[in-house]
Amino acid sequence: MVQEINKKLFNFIDHSPSGFHAVENLCAMLEDAGAERLSENRPWNLTPGKRYFVTRNGSSVLAFMVPQDYTGMLLVSAHSDSPTFRVKTGGEITVEKRYKKLNTEGYGGMILSTWFDRPLSLAGRAVVRTENGVETRLVHIDRDLLVIPSLAIHMSRGMDQKLNPQVDLLPLFGSADTDYKALIAEAAGAEKEDLLQSDVFLYPRQQCTVTGAAEEFILAPRLDDLQCAFAGMEAFLRAENPKKLTLCAVFDNEEVGSRTKQGADSTFLTDTVHRIMDALSIPETTWLQHMADSFMLSADNAHAVHPNYAGKCDETNRCYLNGGIVIKFSANQRYTTDAVSASVFAEICRRADVPVMYFHNRSDMPGGSTLGNIANAHLSLNTVDIGIPQLAMHSAVETAGAQDTAHMVNAMTAFFNTNLQMTEDGAYTF
Ligand code: ZN
C-alpha cells in the first residue's frame, strides 16, 4: 500500500516536470493552506500568526510564518532544479531532409546514459510579446514527444563509450517538416511570431511508482531534490511555532552552483528576512541577537549504500534506504554540519521517533556539495546538512525508500515546532 504521504509526493513530482512547475505547485500548496502571496516589488504588510510566500524568477520560493513573539528563526532549505537538458535558441537540426532533432545543452551533472531510449517531453517557460511588453507563461507538452535513440550494438562495437552531449544525446523530435517553435508557441497560448524566448527543458515521462517485493522502494524522476522540497513545504504547513519565524526556502540552480539571482548564493533569503524584520519593526540589533538562536536544515538528498557497489561508501558510516534521515559530514566543510548542529538535530529526531544515520564520503572521494554552506555565506547560522537516502542520484529516474518521505516530514515538522534557545554559555535548550 502506498503511504498517503508518498501519494502526495508522487502527485507533486508527476506535475512538476520543470523547476518552474515545481515552484508553481509549492505555491499552490501554500495557497490551499491559506498563505498569502507577496511580491518583491510591492510593499509588505505582515500579520503575526499568518503564512506568506514570495517567489523570485518563478523558480525559487520562500515561505514563512510570522510568529507572535519573535525569538529567532527556524529555516529549512531545499532546491527546485534537477539535472536535465535545455533546448538551445534555434533549437532545431534537420538531418538529411528526413528527421528533425533538437539541439540541447546539459544543465547540471546528469548520468547521460540514463536518458536513452525512454519517452521524453518538454517543460519550462516561454516569454511572449504582449501589447505592452512581454509576459512569461509556463509551458508543458504533456505527452510522449521525444526520444534519444541509442546506437545499435552492431554499429557501436569498439567505439569509445564516453558520451558526448553534442553528438550522442540530441533527441529525435519528428520528421523534417516538424516545427518546434510553433509547438512551444501553441503550448504558451501565443502566436508563433509572438514567442520571443523560452527556457525549455527535457524531462523523462516516467511517472513515480513503487517497487520492491514488499513495496519498500519508490522509483521516480527528480527525487533529488523535489522529495526534500516537498517534505519541507509539507512540514512548514503542518507546524505552528508562536516564538520562531519559520521559513521554508526552495532555491533554483543548485545543480549549477547556485550563483544566480534566485539561487542560494543570492540575496533572496537575506532580502526577505530584512523585509520581514522591517515590516515587523524589529530593530536590526534584536534580529542579529536572535540569529544566535536560529537554526537551518539544509535538505538535499543523500547517497545510500548501493547493493551492487557497497564498497563505494565509507567503511563505518553506512546509510540505507528506509533507514531514516541522513546527517552529512565533511571535514572540509562542503557540508555545514558540526558536532553541535548534528547533536541538536539528532535530539529533535529522537524525540520525534525518527531514526537518523550519518554520512561521510570515503576519504578518497570528494563527493558533492549542497546549499548549506552557500546560504551560510549570506545568512550565517547554525546549520545541519541532511537528506533522504537514495540510489542513482542524477539518473533520469532515481530510487529511494518508501518510508523515508514520512521520516523527513516528521523530522522537519518537529524541527519547525521546536523552541530552540541558546544560553549565554552556548548550551542549547529546546
Ligand atoms: Zn540535490
Image (tube, grey):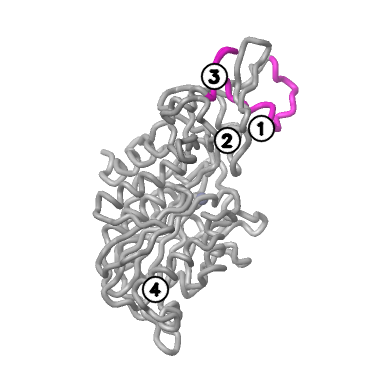
Q: Quadrant of residue 176?
A: top right
Magenta run includes residue 219? no
The amino acid pointed to by label 1 is: Pro
Left or right, 130 with reference to 231: right
Q: State the mark number for residue 85.
A: 2
> Which callout, 2 or 4, points at the residue further toward the start of the chain?
2
> Which callout, 2 or 1, points at the residue further toward the start of the chain?
2
Range of residues picked out in magenta: 155-181
Magenta run includes residue 164? yes
According to the picture, the residue beneath numbered tag 1 turns out to be 165
Q: Mark 4 or mark 1, which is nearer to you?
A: 4
- Out of 134 and 34, give the one closest to the viewer: 134
According to the picture, the residue beneath numbered tag 4 turns out to be 277
> How many other residues sit within 10 Å of disc 1, few (<14), some (14-19) or many (≥20)?
some
> Which callout, 2 or 3, points at the residue further toward the start of the chain?
2
- Out of 115 and 249, give the one closest to the viewer: 249
Q: Position of residue 199 (x, y in %)?
A: 53, 38
Q: CA distance from mark 2 to mark 4?
A: 39 Å
According to the picture, the residue beneath numbered tag 3 turns out to be 179
